[in-house]
Amino acid sequence: MASLLSLGVLVDRAESAPAAASRKLRVSELGLEIQATSTTPSRVSRLANGNLRASEKAVVSVKGRGIHNLSGVVEDEPVARGGRQKAVITDHDAGGETMTFTYDPRVHRVTFARAGGSVSIVRNPDHSYAVNGVPAANGKAVVALLKRSPVYSGASSHSVLLAHRYATRPSLAARTSPTCASEACMGSGPNWEGPPLPAVCTLFEDACDCIACDQMRQTDDWWKCPAEVCN
């Protein structure tokens, strides 16, 4: 049976806009609700190439934009082989549109791909970004550049927001393995996978926040985005 997975605590409607904008963003405060079949260890499979794969169906509800039924397949590569992560998301209420989101931790790059092209975000060592090679000082600048790409601007908001949810969760390895960060508990030699990678949005924090805010922009609760970061 599907279970409701919340991403934070709903803000009191009586709270003033400036007060809400001054504190850390909680995506659920923007009106996003995701109902999905929980991905449990028993539903995660290891492929012949060593990758971990999990799939789920999700119902994404966005205030002002309705409810869409989506499906997602997440596949993570072993850390020893690079740790690349991929999520293929299909929005069945947007004409079956499919988007692929990939993360390459070796170069700190996130890529959005849709029929006809792709757009990538790279996080630099100084915490700035580059979108398809164009510098972006912060998350707000990232969104401004993403909007120039039809891959992003024409995408299903429900798909992007589900991808955001995936990017805020730990990797499949982290969710299916005991807490472990050393060779002593994970083994050694050529098959040692190393400690699981953290959630993508741990590194792309302000970019993730501003992408979520942008996708929720047309809702009544847009003002809850952190003004000092995204507006």
Image: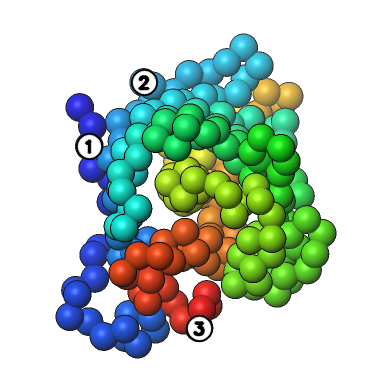
Task: Give the residue drawn at x 46%, y 81%.
Answer: 227
Instruction: Give the left or right position of residue 212, taking residue 31 as reference.
Output: right
As drawn, the residue found furthest toward the front would be: 95
First reached walking from the N terminus: tag 3 or tag 1: 1
In depth, the one of 152 and 106 nearer the eye is 152
Provide the residue designation for mark 1: 3
- 135, above or below 59, in the image: below
Q: Amino acid at mark 3?
A: Glu
Question: Disc 1 residue type?
Answer: Ser
Q: Identify the secondary structure beneath mark 3.
A: helix
Nearer the observer: mark 3 or 2; the answer is 3
State which tag comes first along the sequence, 3 or 2.
2
Q: Which residue is mark 2?
A: 42
Cα distance in 3D space between marks 3 and 1: 34 Å
Query: Of the residues shown, which amino acid type is indicated by label 2?
Result: Ser
Q: Position of residue 204 (x, y in %)?
A: 59, 60
Q: Quadrant of residue 19?
A: bottom left
Which mark is drawn over residue 228? 3
Mark positioned earlier in the residue sequence (1 or 2): 1
Mark 3 to mark 2 CA distance (whole Å): 42 Å
Callouts 3 and 2 close, C-beta under 8 Å = no
Foreground of the two, 46 or 69: 69
Q: Secondary structure at mark 1?
A: strand
Name the residue: 35% across, 53% down: 65
* Residue at the (32%, 80%) spot, across then down: 20
Badge number at residue 227: none
Task: Give the percent coordinates (x, y) of residue 199.
Answer: 52, 49
Secondary structure found at label 2: helix
Q: Residues within 10 Å of mark 2 (few under 14, many from 20)?
A: few
Q: Tell me if I can see residue 170 in this picture.
A: no
Q: Label 1 vs label 2: CA separation? A: 16 Å
